[in-house]
Image: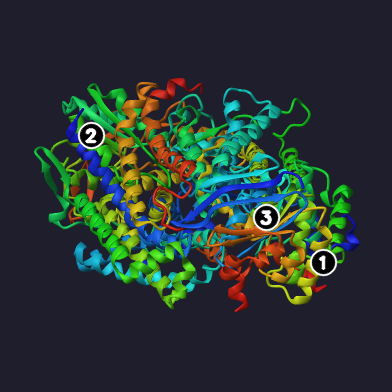
Amino acid sequence: MLDPRLWQAREWVTALTLAAFGLAPVFTELASQPFILDLIARLMILAIAAVSLNLILGHGGMISFGHAAYIGIGAYAVGIPAYYEITNGFLQIAIAIGASAVFAFFTGLISLRTKGVYFIMITMAFAQMVYFAFISIEEYGGDDGLVIETRSEFGGLFDIEDTTTFYYFTWVSLVAALYLVRRIMRSRFGMVIEGAKGNERRMQSIGFDTYKYRLTCYVIAGMICGYAGALLGNFTSFFSPEMMDWTHSGELLFMVVLGGAGSLFGPVLGTAAFVLLEEFLSGITIYWQAIFGVLLILVVLFAPGGIDGFLGRLGRKR
Amino acid sequence: MDWGLLITQVLNGMQLGVLLFLLASGLTLVFGIMDFVNLAHGSLYMMGAFFCATLTEWTGSFVLAAFLALPLTALVGLAVEIIVVRKLYRRDHLDHVLATFGLILVFDTAVQFIWGPAGTAIPLPEWLDGRVEILPNIEFPTFRLLIIATGLVVAIALYWIVTHTRTGMLIRAGASNRTMVSALGIDIGKLFLGLFALGAVLAGLAGLMIAPITEASIGMGNEIIIVAFVVIIIGGIGSIKGAFVAALLVGLIDTMGRSFLDSFLKLFMSIQNAETSAPAISAMMIYILMAAVLAFRPQGLFPPKGR
Amino acid sequence: MFKRLMLSAAAASLLAMPAMASGGHDKVKIGFVTTITTGAGIIGKDMVDALNLAMDDMGGKMGGLEVDLIVEDDGFKPGIGKQKTDKLIKQDDVHFITGYLWSHVLLASRKTALDSGKFLISSNAGPSQLAGKLCHKNFFSTSWQNDQTPMAMGEVLNKKGIKSIYVMAPNYAAGKNMVAGVERTFKGKIVGKDMTKWGKDAQLDFSAELAKAKASGAGAIFIFYPGKAGGAFIKQYQQAGLQGKIPLYSVFTVDSIALPKLQKGKLNGVLGSLNTQFWGPDLDTPQNKKFVSGFRKKYGRYPSFYAAQSYDMMYLIKSAVEAVKGDMHNQDGLRAAMEKANFPSVRGKFSYGNNHFPIQNFYLRKVVKDADGNWTTTIVDTVFKNHQDTYASLCKL
Amino acid sequence: MTAAFLQISNLYKSFGGVAATDHVDLEVLEHEVHAVIGPNGAGKTTLISQLAGELEPDDGQVAFLGRDITRLPPHARAQLGLARSFQITSLMLDMTVRDNVALAIQAHDGHSFRFWRDARRDTALTDRAMQALARVGLEGRADTIAQQMSHGEHRQLEIALALATDPKLLLLDEPMAGMGSEEAARMVEILRDLKGSKTMLLIEHDMDAVFALADRITVLVYGKVIATGKPDEIRADESVRRAYLGDEAG
């Protein structure tokens, strides 16, 4: 894997994309286009969320329609302490990950007892519950949301108020998230998750309590996404329940499928394609959502495997 | 206790309930028999409303427009089935969710393009715009009563179709055993197309019944469709009876929450906080109900037999 | 249909207008954030129409400089609004960030906009926070502070001898301000209150709330429902049989966006109803006559107050650019010029308070038929003269 | 022989009023190969599903190694040493043959909450997976994706999976189903090799295989046990002949 001589289209794209993200600040500085840097930072944060969704969706076969809830939970884990002037980033991120884990654990306990479309709908229902819960909490702005004055502080180690520092903080986070998911999926645990996706009944008959493994995987994905939420909260300095709206969960699903569910890097490409297309199309016409919708339908109908599948086919031709 | 208010609110809850039922019944048929998750069902609801609005403007009669709008909605349903949906039956639920999510975007934008962003009001004829005194000193809007009546008639009709006709037999068989229906030599393609159109008509009916109250507006189906899904999951996928019971339950919970929850919350929190929290908490109760039902009955309240 | 296409094409081309690198001489760059998509897009369109009218009237120039107008759509979401604000700052590098239909969008965008050192001008939203503790030297409003209009309405209710009201508003920043405003001046009892869901999934069926209002025995109902929710509310208010039993008093609900639709829906009960406002299409000032007739000529309908405020915003900026003689780097000069409010406003002469919110009159308006039979509003009384909002004392400017 | 290894007492399960398992008593002794035969619809698969824990009986008891396992879920039974193969091939088709078996070994190890080390480079797993594959003659196919194998190979992998968990009792649900005669012969060989070291409950249609392998046979007809005994006794049993063999013999 680490030997470029063995690389095919897929590996090249992965390496080049990550390198391009890593070098982007230099180019945007030269071209004085700071907004593009913002765009990529947002893209990378959403990519972390998509990678975490892919862990349960692509690798684990659990179609969660409520993944945006963790983005909201993670974001509010930064926002609520900041509201009380607690700006310690380590603490905020710990809360983001911890709260997401707790939420994932308890909702997973119930959701994972259901199958198929019931699972899709119950995960969505739980996300809606958090959505309405945050709307109902007047103290933190309710539907209006909450603006924070300062980003997370990391005791002088580095300062993410600085755009470039924040950008690299995000970049490192994305690379780390990818590495983490790759390790997990290649570990014994990952084998069980993959096996349970392929044939849950058989996995049980050889002695795996698949429920327990899936629940663990569900919690891990929630934690990673909660972390992404904490980043997004810092990035926008603004939180509102709207972040958890079901349409955002749908968008995350689209990002994963567009990139290629079940592949490690696919979700990153899917997110990139999604965010850039959205930016580009919404600049052209106010009717951009229709183009987006048609594209979504076409991808589902004619491009199973998404971008990653396409790269895989490119690789095979060589 | 203000009994007049209570009775009015129960009727309001029923009105919301039957509206949800109209939407959910089509959804549960399509879902239960074709195993197809149609998020764009809410778009058909919206199309019904907009068709009716334009036709009311042209014909000058809401009732006439309503009867003309239904076949139009059915046509849209047919087109959607033929162009997109039928290619997806063999795919998994994730593909259904994504493709119909795409359809929602297309429909919403198309409506903005054709009708503009403002939304369109539907004027009601005089005889529907008034009120009926249902009990001494308790008046209720005539049109909302009409919605309740329509919903009940549709519920009875659907129940009769499902339990007493050959089509209904197929529907029941399909809900519990899909392969059996094809073994009976039925053209599954036609059955599905017909059912999808029926679902579209029911959704369109729901849309055009609510539009004179709230106006036809972009994205009007996007939130209610989620609630309709909650309804069919609580009721048990594929079950008309389940959809009916769950729709009324959800309608009543939502309305009662909006009417009485704030007074209740004031016992614990400041008046301002109670006022702002109450609607969100009553919206949340619906999802809590769903989670509770699924935790104890993973197949919903009335799962079709043999499934 | 054709006209609609043309309008949307105009809006689209505005949206698409890229930040063209200025070739040599300066330009005045104005970013405008409003709602173009969703049902609330109708309001945004009214605002953008007013901007285009102002551009026509000015010949596309302010103090000899060309004007770049960049319109962004917030999609009715604070998060998107903030994102678009970021874009206007970083990509387009505008001089003025303007617009903001919704208070919560403005509150979400405030920090980035002001941190960038640019001017932020609200042409509609006036949340209390920005008038008080969060006031800023670079923030200006060409509209009002949210509380003021309902405060005027509270006075009207007092004068009418109404003893109790039932209050309803959407549950977001402005809704809360509106309720606070009417509570501040109304001397009677508030017998009930409902805050309903707002945003793109706003609640539009008010059956339960209307039943409560009816049962409450209130002397009047006070509402704030901007955009499409207003029409829906009034319709249901009539259907529920409250017309003639509990009178309806509203702010920002019955306007020239809602009226044509209400007229089409034959909701005759609205005729004669009262609302308060800082402006009206029939307000007798030279600039207003020019604006209203120009708007009606160009678009064939009455402008709304949203349009009026947006139109004023353009003239405010123009006055500042002229005062500094086109030196766009002279921030202090631009600010000082704007603080003077030395421009022909549609509302007539007004002054800015310390918090840069207008000190202005508020009028009582009545819904009437105009000479052509179109429904519009006419000013019947002045409720407040030179009224300053109550939060100004909290502002340390 | 020792006391019952697997003890089924009075097991009862009905579907919509029709008894699929009608008060079945059956015991499997350690190290024996016990075959269950019966015509189609006799309730053999229903029985095995209840033993594996996928179906819950309406009444009766299943005891394994002296422990009541009637209400245990499938994975817990597997961990006690009860392994099954499926009549209709049930594998992780998207994974390689080696990964399939490695998973079974992992399950037996009980160390699967390991998130970091690369499982495919874990020799403790891969070596044993190769050994297990060698036992069923699939060592040459280790890197093949399971989906791409032939039906016969699938059946062999089924057995390999069951064996890899090092079970005390093998529940084999028609291991020869759908096989050609050559493949079936190879399967009989594989099972004969295991005979003596593993206790097996074998459900099978192939009478040659049954009589070649079984120490004892139980005959199930319409959910009821009509006879249990050594192959010769069963062959001689009048009621069995009438109900079952007789039919087949014509």
Residue linked to disc 1: D189
Identified at 67% across, 55% down, the residue is: A202
Establish whether labels 2 and 1 are both on one chain: no
> Residue B160 versus residue C105: which sits nearer the camera?
B160
Q: Mark 2 lies on which chain?
A: C
Q: How far apart are marks 1 and 3 (CA)?
A: 25 Å
Q: Residue C294: which numbered mark, if any? A: none
Q: Quadrant of the N terminus of chain C?
A: bottom left
Establish if A39 lies above or below A101: below
Q: Which chain carries label 1?
A: D
Q: Where is residue A245 in the image (x, y as percent from the top left)?
A: 50, 45
Q: Report the side of B253 relative to A158 (left or right).
A: left
Q: Residue A202: which numbered mark, if any? A: 3
Callout 2 crowding tier (Cα within 10 Å): few <14, some 14–19, many ≥20: many
Residue linked to disc 2: C213
Q: Quadrant of residue C315?
A: top left
